[in-house]
Image (cartoon, rainbow, N blue to C red):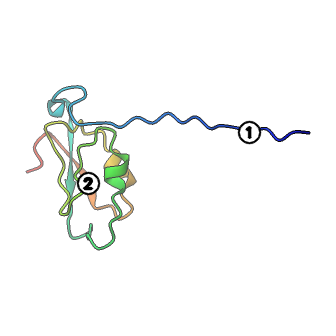
Amino acid sequence: MAEKDEKVIVAWSKPAPGEAGRTGDWRSQTPVIDHDKCPQKDYCLYCWLYCPDAVISRDFPLEIDLEYCKGCGVCAEECPRKAITMVDGRDPG
């Protein structure tokens, strides 16, 4: 029996901020990063990896572009250190 050469096809999309326009006014909750719980020495970046809108920087200290953040909470859910919390409202202050 001849060996079958299988090819794997993978769909890959790369989100970018602003794909749907400025969406920051959609959110009812805002992510806030506790930088003491998010040390840059470990380079976890799960929040950056899982953010569906690509609004989290890869540079430390991490920053979230609130002009485009929809407040979905995926970053807070995926953070293994619980360094991101969701607060009510559009203004993290």
Left or right of 84 in this view: 5: right
Specify few, some or many for label 1: CA neighbours under 10 Å numbering under 14, 14-19, or 20 or more: few
**Residue type at numbered disc 1:** Asp
Cα separation between marks 2 and 1: 47 Å
Q: Which mark is residue 69?
A: none
Q: Residue furthest bottom?
A: 41
Q: How many marks?
A: 2
Q: Secondary structure at mark 1?
A: loop
- Write the residue at 12% across / 48% down: 92
Q: Secondary structure at mark 2?
A: strand
- Residue 36 in picture, x, y percent from top left: 21, 70
| Earlier residue among tags 2 and 1 | 1
Q: Quadrant of residue 88?
A: top left
- Residue 39 in picture, x, y percent from top left: 26, 71
Q: Residue furthest right?
A: 1
- Is 76 situated above or below 67? below
Look at the image and tell me in which quarter the N terminus lies: top right
**Residue type at numbered disc 2:** Thr
Task: State which mark lies toward you, 2 or 1.
Answer: 1
- Write the residue at 36% across / 63% down: 44
Labels 2 & 1 near each other (Cβ < 8 A):
no
Q: Which mark is residue 85?
A: 2
> Which residue has dot 1 on it?
5
- Residue 41 in picture, x, y percent from top left: 29, 74
Nearest the camera: 56 or 36? Answer: 56
- Residue 30 in picture, x, y percent from top left: 19, 44
- Is 6 situated above or below 34? above
Specify few, some or many for label 2: CA neighbours under 10 Å numbering under 14, 14-19, or 20 or more: some
Nearest the camera: 11 or 38? Answer: 11
